Image (cartoon, rainbow, N blue to C red):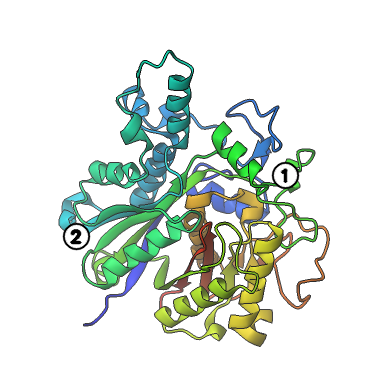
Amino acid sequence: MQLKRVVVTGLGALTPLGNNLDTYWANLIKGVSGAGPITRFNPEKFKTQFACEVKDYDPLNYFDRKEVRKMDLFTQFAMIAATEAFEHSGLDLASIDLSKAGVIWGSGIGGLKTFQDEVMSFAQGDGTPRFNPFFIPKMIADISSGMISIKYGFRGPNFVTVSACASATNAMIDAMTYIKLGKAKIMITGGSEASVTEAGMGGFNSMKALSERNDSPQTASRPFDKDRDGFVLGEGAGALILEEYEHAKARGAKIYAEIVGGGMSADAYHITAPHPDGLGATSVMINALEDAEMQPEEIDYINVHGTSTPLGDMSEVIAIEKVFGEHAYNLNISSTKSMTGHLLGAAGAIEAIAAIKSIEHQIVPPTINHFTDDDQFNPKLNFTFNKAQERTINACLSNTFGFGGHNTSVVFRKLD
């Protein structure tokens, strides 16, 4: 069977750095931090009192009041990013075979705010069940892909992947695979998350996963810095239009990159901690390169998982040096989570967009907030600290790892 080629023809982003694609990318290159004091609730009694929130967001700028009542914030974010990506792609619904167009989305948690509010309301009542009729459809993670498909009438494959912080990348890999196999021509894919809530912050604080640098939120996310103390929680969404190459070429679409491979693996080690020797991270990058039929030396830039946790950053670097050998020191490596925070199930989507835009503009976004070298890391590694770097970029790899030991990597290449 001849596998189809898959390309990226549309992008959409709603992030802590900007509420559209262009603003997001501009602020990435400038090295802007999206962190600040939490505004979604009063965090006074929480150990961490800051996050990377979406700024200046009013749902009524995008939806009418009736629609807003039916959607959790994570679904609102999904719809907005998907709409931008669709419009960006130039697709014409009248000329699409809707049975060959689908949606595969990712979310690690789904409607956490809805769940929290409904259960708290019940607990504070007299025991009489007075639940919102939209409680369940607002909460379930798969409602995001369902609502996107309803908006566009896409009747092809439709589901949501849930693999913690690897969710969006798993969704992209699945979407790519359906097109490669000829099961679809067009897929909207990506991920969304809205977990800056009392339950989200409290839960991650109790695990000691979050930075507690309340005196300096904008410098709290410090991937690969000696003094990193945990990740910064983010929110938002990223969307990509994946399209079969011949279909895109026939309609004269602008092609931003080719998605050439994806890898998946498991650490099979611990529910939250990465394998200290980077075993899962090593195998997932090897799997992605093999799927792309590429050699390690062909990769120019890795957008790393790089969450700013002591163990996670170390294990990923160990894996990179195992996979890439001496070529590791020719790579640019950067963690855009230093700016966006960690968007959990949406992280892979906005980071894939960063990788694709780096190919388009031949520039690597920085890893900001580097103050002190960590002598555990080889000084020959280029972490793109503090300032974007221009270079030739023909191919990028994007890593995303999740609690439960889920590992995903995806490879993008400049179209030949």
Query: Element under label 2?
Result: helix
Query: Which residue is more in the foreground, 220 or 137?
Result: 137
Q: Which residue is mark 1?
A: 218
Q: CA distance from mark 2 to mark 1?
A: 44 Å
Q: Position of residue 346 (x, y in %)?
A: 48, 51
Q: Residue furthest top?
A: 126
- Left-right relation of 62 to 209: left
**Where does the image place residue 216, in percent across and percent down from the top left?**
78, 41
Q: Quadrant of residue 308?
A: bottom right
Q: Is residue 53 visible?
A: no
Q: Is residue 17 left or right of residue 375?
A: left
User: Which residue is painted at 23% across and 64% down in the image?
Assistant: 185
**Which structural element holds mark 1?**
helix
Question: The disc labelled 1 sits on which kind of residue?
Answer: Gln
Residue toward you, 118 or 348: 118
The quarter of the picture where residue 243 lies is bottom left
Q: Which residue is mark 2?
A: 100
Residue 115, quarter of the rendered image:
top left
Q: Nearer the viewer, residue 224 or 182?
A: 224
